[in-house]
Amino acid sequence: MNRTLKSLTAASLIMMGTSPAFADTAASSDNPWMVRARVINVMPDESGSLSTGGTPLIGDVDIETSIVPELDISYFLNEKIAFELILGVTPHDVSTKDLEVPVVGTLGSVDLGDVWLLPPTLTAQYHFTQFGSFKPYIGAGVNYTLFFNEDEGSVADSIDYDPSFGPALQAGFDYDLDGEKGGWAINVDVKKVWINTDVTVDLTSALGTALGAQSVIVDADVDIDPVILGVGMGYKF
């Protein structure tokens, strides 16, 4: 996560927080809540650095895409400013790619099982209202990702993922089907979420004998950084 990205996210939130429109809640006091249900395609843009015992390894990680349902809840301070909480869980198959281990040689793709991600994301949004029923928006916020139900697969003895905290950016639109004041809407949404986790993999059973070691622990610093594309329906109360 680079310094420019952090600054961009912080600046976006500060601008929204200091806008005069932020304090004007009267316009949406009659229907501040909106709920959306989407089908999302979570497409990791993964990369990782691997090492064992402090020695870097040649190789990378591969994380499969996942298509799942998702729910989000928005609260509108006024017709332009809203906060959105995105809720959902995603399963992903994980493996190494082009892995090479000293003494052992090239292992290539090693199955590291699968893991579930719980990535609640909170964004502050600005909605453009000058286009009638077509309402595009942009947003910026934060993401906290928990990893659970880790399955180490058929090769590793165990695998562990650390939680992640990072920024998120968002753009999308609602198209109102019941008029401009609320009701049903079609939604299309795309997010970029920065997720980084430290992964610890125990490969003692697979590599211990070949390396003459009592334990073989591979450490991986993994950037998942998915693009999330969602399509669904929303209802504004």
Image: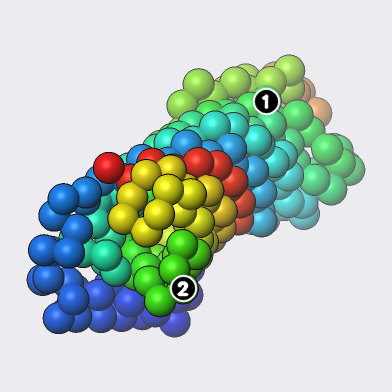
- Is residue 53 at all visible to an observer of this figure? no
Viewer-nearest residue: 104 or 74: 74
Q: Please, what secondary structure does the residue beneath circle 2 have?
A: loop
- Label 1: which residue? 113
Amino acid under label 2?
A: Phe
The numbered disc on residue 235 is none
For label 1, the SS is strand
On screen, residue 217 versus residue 23, left or right, reads: right
Residue at 31% x, 55% y is: 181
Residue 92 drawn at (x, y percent): 64, 33
Mark 1 nearby-residue class (10 Å; few <14, some 14–19, many ≥20): some
Q: Which residue is mark 2?
A: 131
Image quadrant for the C terminus? top left
Look at 12% across and 64% down and name the residue there. Answer: 25
**Residue depicted at x 64% and y 43%:** 41
- Label 2 neighbour load within 10 Å: few <14, some 14-19, many 20+: few
The colour scheme is rainbow
